[in-house]
Each structure stands twice: as C-alpha cells, then as structure tokens.
C-alpha cells in the first residue's frame, strides 16, 4: 500500500510517500480501506520529533483519524462486517491506503456525511467530549471559553457546547476567524492580537475554559473563572511551566485538569467512542453539528497539507483524500 512516512524529524518536506505492507488485522481489530484521513496539530509535533508514538502505534506513519470501508474483521469482532462505512480514532498510521484499528474505536459514518467529513470527526469529538464534558463537567446554561476557537478542536467545542445549551466565547487571531466562529454558534469572540482576553472577559467571567495555549494564559484564565470554575488543558503551545497562586484556587474553588488522548488504552477509547456516539452523533444527524472542512489534499500532498496547517490560516479541518 502507499503510505506517507516521516522520513526524519523536520519540516513538512520530510513527509514522503513510500510503499509499505498492508498492516495485519489481529483479534479484536478491523482493517479499514482508508478513504480520507484528518490532520491534527499533534501530527505536526510528531513530524518534528517532539511527540513520539505510544507503544504499538505505527512508528513513522502519522495520522490519528480516518474514515473508510471495513475490509476485514479480526476474531471476536461482532459489531462490524466487511463493507461497513466507518470512521475511527487511531494511535497513528492514518496517512495510508489501509489502517488497522481496535473495533471499539470505530463509529458508523453518519448517513448525511461524506468520507471527507467523517474523517474530520474522531480526534476532535473524542477530545472535546472527554475534556469539556467528562472532565470539566460543562452544564447547560454555563459559559465556555475556547482558546483557539478556529482550530479543529475549537469548531467542534463551539458547536457541541452551543447545541447542548451553553454560551460559548472564543479567542481567535483574526476578525474573519471570529466571525466564522460566531456563525458556528459562538456568542462572542476576542481577537487576541487586538485585545487582551482577560480584560475583555473579566467582568462577565466564564465557568469552563478549554485551553491549548498555556504559558501566560494560565494566570489570566484563573482571573476570569467564576467561582467553582474549571480549567482544562489539552496542550500548552506557549509553555508548560506556570506559577500558581494557591489562594486564588481556594478562594474561587477552581478545578484544574487536563489530558492527552493518544496514549490512553483501547478500553478507555472504546468507552469514549460509545459516549460520543450517544451524545454527539444525534447532533450530527439533526444538523446541529456540521463538520467544517477547510480544504482537502490528495494523500500524496501531505507535506503541502502540513504547511497549510502550520500557517494557522485555516478555520476547521484539513483532510487528506485517497483518490
Ligand atoms: N490533549 C489531547 O488529547 C489533544 C487532542 C487533539 C488536539 N490537541 C491539541 O489541541 C489543539 C488544537 O488542535 P487542532 O488540531 O484542532 O489544531 P489546529 O486546527 O491546527 O488549530 C490550532 C490553532 O491554534 C491557534 N494558535 C494559537 N496560538 C498558537 C500557537 N502558539 N501556535 C500555533 N497555533 C496557535 C491558531 O489559531 P489563531 O490563528 O486563531 O491563533 C491555530 O489555527 C492543539 O494544540 C493540539 O495539540 C490535544
């Protein structure tokens, strides 16, 4: 099969197409003929050599989510059969013509979606559901702040939280991105290049913050959280090390949490898949959550797709397509 391989750590040009054997499908797994693969920011970190794949994942083929058609089912797989259209969360190996994945990490492609749209869903819906709803416990009527509102994660968090009755505000790097987030259901945005988000949101406050920035945002986040607020981290692009004023934590009874999805075991991911299917798939079926595809590229152009992702000029998801 053809696959995009990280030939060495570095810039997008290190992504090159090579011939690889089709992966073997073991017990409890399915082999998917990949139609489309979603790009995610962690793929960039992996390409740069900063995010090693967990044990058992493809060492040099990136790709955390795909959609496609099941070609083969391993022993003990009951739910799926050859020919089923699925999307799936992977630990790697998605930038290829075939991928193997534990059966529990697959979900049916919603009827109204294309392969390209379906490939954009697993990584973001799983991450958002776990962090915003399971860890931070966002409730209807509360206000959620999403940093990086235009990211794949951001457009997912906005739509799910708004559909479930929360008010959502976002930070973005341009006015255009802010307006696009409003169209998706955000009630407000702060262009952080023009305005300080702490000053803009201090008076009203927020209940839950989904942060991927870290660094200098930490203290500002604590300041704008309302009493009993929750701050949840999914990355720290601006730095890991911060100073905590414990008194502030106690006075406002703030909960700080965070998680990474990729290294979690199959049992966890399968349970999360069931939750996402119960809670998020109905929002897709009734049109309250729509995938936002910024651009697709043929698999062979993965390097160009990474260049676009790193330019941060997109809103939504970038997807590779097997033609
Ligand atoms: N913990 C987990 O399990 C998990 C899972 C998936 C993703 N993530 C993380 O979630 C974040 C979003 O992922 P994604 O794939 O949705 O990202 P994405 O589509 O590539 O978007 C990232 C956006 O973040 C904004 N940004 C702000 N500060 C930035 C900085 N210093 N460097 C780069 N971008 C910056 C940019 O928008 P503006 O131009 O508006 O600033 C950019 O478009 C990433 O940090 C990723 O690592 C975590």
Image: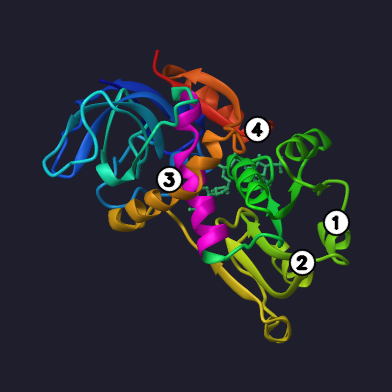
- 149 within the magenta span: no
Nearer to us: label 1 or label 3 = 3
Question: From this viewpoint, is residue 100 visible?
Answer: yes
- Label 2: how many Cα within 10 Å (few below 14, some 14–19, many 20+): some
Disc number for residue 220: 2
| Upstream in sequence: badge 4 or badge 3 | 3
The answer to whether the residue labelled 2 contacts the one labelled 4, judged by CB atoms less than 8 Å apart, is no
Q: CA distance from mark 4 to mark 3?
A: 32 Å
Foreground label between 1 and 4: 1
Tag 3 and tag 2, C-beta contact below 8 Å: no
Distance CA(mark 3)–CA(mark 2): 35 Å
Residue span colored magenta: 116-134
From the viewer's side, name the closer residue of 296 and 165.
Answer: 165
Circle 2: element type: helix
Residue bearing mark 1: 196
Residue 255 percent coordinates (x, y): 61, 75
Residue on which the image places disc 4: 311
In the depicted view, which residue is nearer to us: 281 or 16?
281
Q: What's the magenta bit mostly, secondary-structure-wise?
A: helix
Crowd rating for badge 3 (residues with CA inside 10 Å; few <14, some 14–19, many 20+): some
């Amino acid at each position: 099969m053809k696959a995009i391989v990280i030939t060495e750590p570095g810039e997008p040009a290190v992504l090159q197409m090579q011939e690889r054997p089709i992966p073997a499908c073991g017990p409890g797994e399915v082999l998917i003929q990949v139609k489309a693969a979603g790009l995610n920011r962690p793929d960039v970190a992996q390409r740069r050599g900063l995010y090693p794949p967990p044990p058992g994942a493809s060492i040099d083929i990136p790709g955390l989510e795909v959609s496609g058609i099941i070609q083969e089912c391993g022993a003990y797989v009951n739910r799926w059969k050859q020919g089923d259209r699925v999307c799936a969360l992977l630990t790697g190996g998605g930038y290829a013509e075939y991928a193997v994945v534990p059966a529990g990490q697959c979900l049916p492609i919603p009827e109204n979606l294309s392969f390209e749209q379906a490939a954009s869903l697993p990584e973001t819906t799983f991450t958002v559901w776990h962090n915003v709803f399971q860890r931070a416990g966002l409730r209807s009527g509360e206000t959620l702040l999403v940093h990086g509102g235009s990211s794949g994660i951001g457009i997912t968090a906005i739509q799910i939280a708004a559909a479930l009755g929360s008010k959502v505000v976002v930070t973005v790097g341009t006015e255009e991105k802010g307006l696009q987030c409003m169209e998706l259901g955000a009630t407000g945005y702060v262009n952080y290049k023009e305005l300080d988000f702490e000053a803009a949101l201090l008076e009203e406050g927020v209940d839950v913050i989904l942060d991927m920035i870290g660094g200098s945002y930490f203290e500002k986040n604590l300041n704008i959280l309302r009493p009993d607020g929750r701050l949840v981290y999914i990355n720290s692009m601006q730095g890991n090390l911060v100073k905590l004023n414990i008194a502030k934590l106690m006075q406002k009874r703030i909960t700080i949490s965070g998680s990474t999805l990729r290294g979690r075991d199959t049992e966890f991911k399968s349970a999360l898949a069931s939750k996402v299917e119960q809670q998020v798939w109905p929002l897709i079926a009734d049109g309250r959550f729509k995938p936002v595809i910024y651009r697709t590229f043929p698999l062979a152009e993965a390097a160009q797709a990474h260049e676009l992702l790193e330019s941060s000029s997109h809103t939504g998801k970038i997807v590779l397509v097997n033609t």
